[in-house]
Amino acid sequence: MINIKTPREIELMRVAGEIVGDTHKYLIPYLKPGITTKEIDSLARDYIIKKGATPSCYNYNGYPGNICISENEEVVHGIPGRRKLCDGDIVTLDICACYKGYHGDSAWSYPIGNISEEKKYLLEHTEKALYEGIKEAVAGNRIGDIGYAIEKYALDHNLGVVKEFVGHGVGTKVHEDPSVPNYGKKGTGLRLKEGMVIAIEPMLIFGSEEIEVDENGLTAYTIDGSNAAHYEHTIAITNGEPIILTGEINNG
């Protein structure tokens, strides 16, 4: 079921989204070699709560962290722990927050210290693929238009598209209908309507597109150990330009 949001609901989601975006910005100065992913998780939890929201990820489908923290070959749902970030890593923070019953959701991949040119390329073009998808997210277009734009950009830049994990609707649940794949054909799929709120989130990789899920049942990683990047915004569909509800984020 597709839930069309009222202006009041979108305003609440804007607040939730701003908290998510501000959490990203708050964490950037801490993303240095030596910090553990558990320490990052605790900082995020405390900041989200301080802002009057709650971490949506905690205990979602049994997930034990407050935010998802994935490194290098991990695609999504990395679990915070004792791992220390190292110079040359890339780390993805997937942050969700619930404010007055409504959610915001945004993921961003960050460089740790000095990263390789290959990793810089991956981050740059995964972020750009996200914005190619966002351009298509206007009333009257279809879900397939978003996926087509993302996939075309990725393939044009010799990057693989993870197909097992996709974008989604956002609202009173962090994951709602519709699914928003990062691949597709123009002019196909559900027609977008004003008032829909969706998360667009390309996950791109160097190397094989095949992934595996860890024995923990949550963390997905590339089967050949190649690096992955993940960028995501929650947006509101309008009759004009899409509204990014999770704010602008920089890689630091």
Image (tube, rainbow, N blue to C red):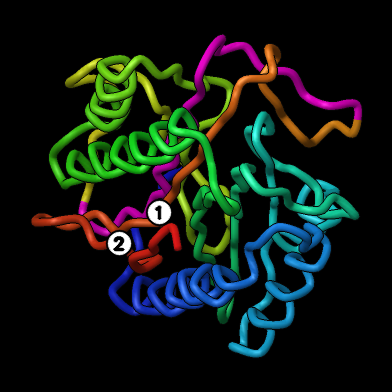
In reply to whether residue 87 is colored magenta, the answer given is no
**Residue 84 relative to residue 74: left or right:** right
Q: Which x, y percent locates residue 88?
A: 62, 42
Q: Earlier in the sequence, mark 1 or mark 2?
A: 1
Please state which amino acid type lies under the numbered disc 1: His
Above or below residue 84? Residue 17 is: below
The magenta-colored residue range is: 194-215
Compared to residue 15, the image places residue 108 above or below, namely above
Which residue in the protein does label 1 denote? 233
Between 43 and 51, the one nearer to me in the picture: 43
Please tell me in which quadrant of the rendered image residue 227 appears: top right
Marks 1 and 2 close (CB-CB < 8 Å): yes
Q: Answer whether residue 178 is visible to the viewer in this image.
A: no
The answer to whether residue 171 is above or below residue 43 is above
Q: Residue at x 59, y 62 (%)?
A: 96
Q: Residue at x 53, y 12 (%)?
A: 207
- Residue 162 - label: none
Residue 107 in sight: yes
**In this picture, residue 87 sits left or right of residue 1:** right
Find numbered disc 2 in the image and state the secondary structure of the residue it sits on.
Answer: strand
Q: Quadrant of the C terminus?
A: bottom left
- The residue located at (51%, 23%) in the rendering is 205
Q: Circle 2 sits on which residue?
A: 244
Label 1 Cα crowd, 10 Å radius (few <14 / some 14-19 / many 20+): many
